Amino acid sequence: MSLYGKSVLRLAYSYLHNMSDAEDVLQDALIQYIKAQPHFESPEHEKAWFLRVAMNISKNKINYNKVRKTDDLNEDLVASAAEDLAFLWEAVKQLPMKYREVVHLYYHEGYSTAQIASLLTARESTVRSCLLRARAKLKVVLKEGYDFEE
C-alpha cells in the first residue's frame, strides 16, 4: 500500500471523481491482492497488476453506480508542481473514458504507450491513436473553456 497506494487512489479517482469511492477501490484492490497472493516478476509488474485491478474495480463501480457526484481531489495526492496545471486535469475529466484513462496513464503515471497497451490489453497503435485524439479534443476544450491559442 505504501508503494502503490497513491497511484491506485489517483487512478481510481480519475475514473470515479469521488474520493470515497476511490478509497473503496483501493481497499478492494488490497483485498484482492491478499486473496490472490500473486507472484510478480518485478516491481513494475506488481504496480501494473495493482493498476489493472483498480481499473477493473473502478469500471465495475461505474456500471453499478451510474450517477456519481464529484468532490475535490485531496491536496496531498497532487504534486505541488501540478497545482498550476489543475485546469488541465479539469479539462481531461471532460474527455470520454477511453481517452481519459490513456492520458492519465501516459502523463500522470509515466507509462509508455507499449506499457499502456499491455495494461489495457489493446494494440500500441490504438493507444497512440487515443492519445492523438485526446490531445486534439483537449485543444478544443482548452480553446473554448480557457481561451488558449495554439
Image (spheres, grey):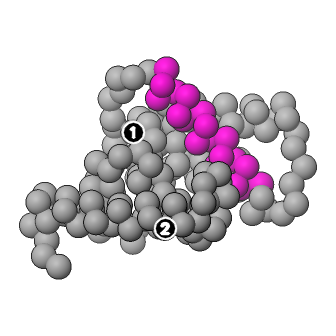
Quarter-of-image position of residue 65: top left
Mark 1 or mark 2: name the one nearer the start of the chain: 1
Q: Nearer the viewer, residue 40 or 140?
A: 140
Residue 11 visible to an observer of this rendering: yes
Q: Which residue is mark 1?
A: 17
Q: Nearer the viewer, residue 20 or 97?
A: 97
The x, y position of residue 27, in whole percent, is 65, 33
Q: Amino acid at mark 2?
A: Arg
| Span highlighted in magenta in the image | 46-64
Task: For marks 1 and 2, give the CA distance.
Answer: 25 Å
The x, y position of residue 8, in whole percent, is 60, 48
The x, y position of residue 33, in whole percent, is 79, 38
> Which secondary structure, mark 2?
helix
Q: Nearer the viewer, residue 127 or 28?
A: 127
Q: Is residue 33 left or right of residue 54?
A: right
**What residue is rendered at 28% in x and 66% in y?**
136
**What residue is rendered at 52% in x and 27% in y?**
61
Check the image and report above or below for 85 versus 104: below
Quarter-of-image position of residue 118: bottom right
Q: Which residue is mark 2?
A: 128
The x, y position of residue 2, in whole percent, is 70, 52
